Image (cartoon, helix red, strand yellow):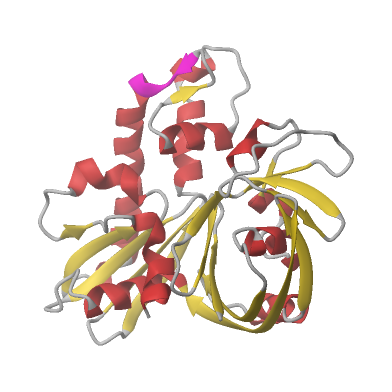
């Protein structure tokens, strides 16, 4: 049996081989010493792990002590573990295919040393035992581009510039149809968090005299309400700020990749925030966004 995991700054996605992926908002609230009722859904479960009782997902964002996985340290195995196993509804024994933005031997060795073992965990009140026998690491953007070439989602008559827009970091690479990576780089702090900060720092939001939080702004963008709570509507500034954010991002990437662009036939946008760009680029030649760009990386491994 194989468990596939994509642990991101904004959301975590896991899937058992052959089954549909489960997306959970990468936020947790520790209720170990509190009596808090939760919804106990698949997307927002209550998890008992390592002596801690946690609410994960959307319902956690409503708790006063909520923290994102990034704030907790998403490369810490003890932080990752609840998200990794929260989607399982049966005992597991097998290997993990783990998607990473870049290879880091120190982080990978740390994950192997803590996760290759047997773990007991309760999800929504039911106990499970999971035995991890091995962990294999894959570069997340690479697998998505390779799969797109193989399935002919993108043409193979030229190279592909893939732009993977996550919550905090944007990764990008240029790959040939043969799978050779000509160039890769990452820009921190230019993903969805950057757009959320632009909104918070707009004159409209500053005039409200309220301390807005980045995760809730990002949630309002993701669900299409463009509203913070009940009273703060930021839709009037969203479109121009989105345009500015997109232009800055693409200009940076094109400048950094300029020596490798002559044979690029397709610019492919993937990642959790790629959906924001669909209306802008869907009718432009040479641009491509998959149907569910947030699942591109994990579906490539599921399909592989």
Residue 227 occupies which quadrant of the picture? Answer: top left
Residue at image position (26%, 72%) is 148
- The answer to whether residue 233 is magenta is yes
| 165 left or right, relative to 217 | left
From what the image shows, is residue 291 above or below residue 65?
below
- The answer to whether residue 18 is magenta is no
What count of labels does the image hold? 0
Give x and y (percent) for residue 5: 54, 68
Give x and y (percent) for residue 155: 14, 73
Residue 128 occupies which quadrant of the picture? Answer: bottom right
Asked if residue 279 can be seen in this view, the reply is yes
| 299 left or right, relative to 209 | left
From what the image shows, is residue 214 above or below residue 17?
above
From what the image shows, is residue 163 above or below residue 33?
below
Asked if residue 188 can be seen in this view, the reply is no
| 234 left or right, relative to 254 | right
Residue at image position (40%, 27%) is 225
Residue at image position (19%, 48%) is 281
Q: Nearer the viewer, residue 244 or 239?
A: 239
Q: Nearer the viewer, residue 1 or 171?
A: 1
Residue at image position (58%, 39%) is 58
The region drawn magenta spans 232-236
Q: Nearer the viewer, residue 158 or 88?
A: 88
Give x and y (percent) for residue 207: 51, 12
Quadrant of the rendering where the C terminus is positioned: bottom left
Quadrant of the rendering where the N terminus is positioned: bottom right
| 189 left or right, relative to 264 | right
């Amino acid at each position: 049996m194989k468990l596939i995991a994509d642990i991101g700054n904004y959301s975590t996605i896991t899937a058992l081989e052959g089954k549909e992926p489960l997306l959970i908002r990468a936020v947790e609230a520790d209720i170990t010493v509190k009596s808090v009722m939760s919804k106990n859904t698949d997307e927002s479960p209550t998890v008992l792990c390592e002596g801690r009782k946690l609410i994960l997902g959307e319902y956690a964002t409503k708790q006063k002590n909520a923290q994102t996985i990034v704030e907790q340290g998403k490369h810490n195995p003890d932080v990752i573990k609840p998200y990794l196993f929260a989607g399982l509804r049966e005992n597991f024994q097998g290997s993990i295919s783990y998607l990473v933005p870049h290879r880091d031997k120190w982080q990978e060795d740390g994950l192997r040393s803590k996760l290759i073992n047997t773990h007991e965990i309760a999800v929504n009140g039911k106990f499970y035992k999971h035995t991890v026998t091995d962990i294999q690491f894959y570069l997340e953007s690479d697998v998505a581009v390779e799969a797109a070439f193989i399935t002919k989602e993108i043409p193979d008559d030229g190279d592909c510039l893939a732009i993977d827009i996550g919550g905090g970091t944007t990764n990008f690479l240029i790959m040939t149809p043969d799978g050779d990576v000509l160039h890769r780089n990452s820009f921190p702090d230019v993903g969805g968090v950057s757009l959320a900060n632009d909104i918070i720092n707009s004159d409209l939001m500053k005039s409200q005299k309220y301390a807005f939080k980045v995760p809730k702004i990002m949630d309002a963008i993701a669900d299409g309400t463009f509203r913070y709570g009940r009273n703060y509507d930021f839709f009037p500034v969203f479109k121009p700020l989105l345009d500015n954010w997109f232009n800055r991002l693409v200009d940076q990437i094109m400048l950094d990749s300029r020596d490798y662009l002559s044979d690029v036939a397709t610019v492919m946008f993937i990642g959790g925030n790629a959906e924001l760009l669909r209306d802008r680029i869907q009718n432009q030649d040479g641009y491509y966004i998959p149907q569910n760009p947030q699942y591109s990386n994990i579906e490539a491994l599921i399909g592989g």
